[in-house]
Image (cartoon, helix red, strand yellow):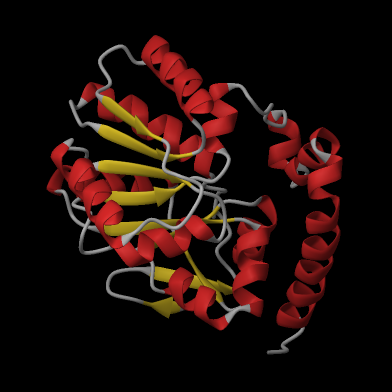
Amino acid sequence: MKVRTERYTGSVLGAYIDVLSWDAAMTRLLGWAHAHESRYVTICNVHVVVSASRDAAYREIINGSNMATPDGAPVAWMLRRQGFANQPRISGPDVMWALCERAADESLPIYCYGSTDTTLALLETRLRAAFPALQMTMVSPPFRALSAEEDTAAVERINASGAGIVFVGLGCPKQERWMAEHRGRVNAVMIGVGAAFDFHAGTVQRAPAWMRDNGLEWLHRLASEPGRLWKRYLVTNTLFILGAARQLLGGK
């Protein structure tokens, strides 16, 4: 276990993942948001930790985040195997929904950055129906690198919105790199939520709770999008199993 400025983390394939309860995560995130502290949070599933294990620069981004939550059930299981018996899974879609509920109650504006205009329109409709008081801004950036001027303008728009939370849905690893590059510039806590925009918009069906709780969400997503995801899950899951076994047996 590592202690990092009031944080306790375990290590999963070299990625430092926070050991914390759901309530502690919410308290910390909302505290940063209301103070408009420039922080970034990585939501770490199997794909993220395997990518971090194979890419030193990406691993540095994950380990440099202000919070890294165990999104995937296998990641939370690895922490429990290290002695953190009660560590729950803290997933991106669940974090986003809970924070939107609290933000609506606490008059805290949010900002959604990423995905497509179509998905964001559906997401906004869903969030407004669930949380009528929620103040939100939705922006779909171009699917290309922004110029320095465009990026500066994007940051100015985020800060001018008054958002305390920026949900970033650019996909892994782009969203983590974007957040790391913008810490110190965006006056809010940035949270990379991956597919949460699609799940909450209804454009992608989320796995049933029993599958999520038993580490089978990947199987549901594979069945939903086999052509796009089969290679990713075949390679990633195999590498995670091998890396987890090596770590638990005392290897590097």
- Name the residue rendered at 25%, 15% in the picture: 133
Picture quadrant of residue 216 = top right
Residue 151 drawn at (x, y percent) = 29, 55
- Name the residue rendered at 80%, 61% in the picture: 237
Which one is nearer the viewer's eye here, 189 or 142? 142
Residue 224 drawn at (x, y percent) = 80, 33
Which one is nearer the viewer's eye here, 217 or 155? 155
Which quarter of the figure is the C terminus placed in?
bottom right
249 with respect to 36 (left or right): right
- Name the residue rendered at 69%, 26% in the picture: 205
Picture quadrant of residue 146 = bottom left
211 with respect to 44 (left or right): right
**Is 28 rendered above or below residue 182?**
above
- Name the residue rendered at 51%, 59% in the picture: 174
**Is 246 rendered above or below residue 190?**
below
Which one is nearer the viewer's eye here, 250 or 194? 194
Which one is nearer the viewer's eye here, 37 or 116? 116
**Is 244 rendered above or below residue 166?**
below
State whether residue 117 appears in this view: yes
Residue 164 drawn at (x, y percent) = 22, 41
Residue 250 drawn at (x, y percent) = 72, 87
**Is 22 rendered above or below residue 80?**
above
State whether residue 188 appears in this view: no
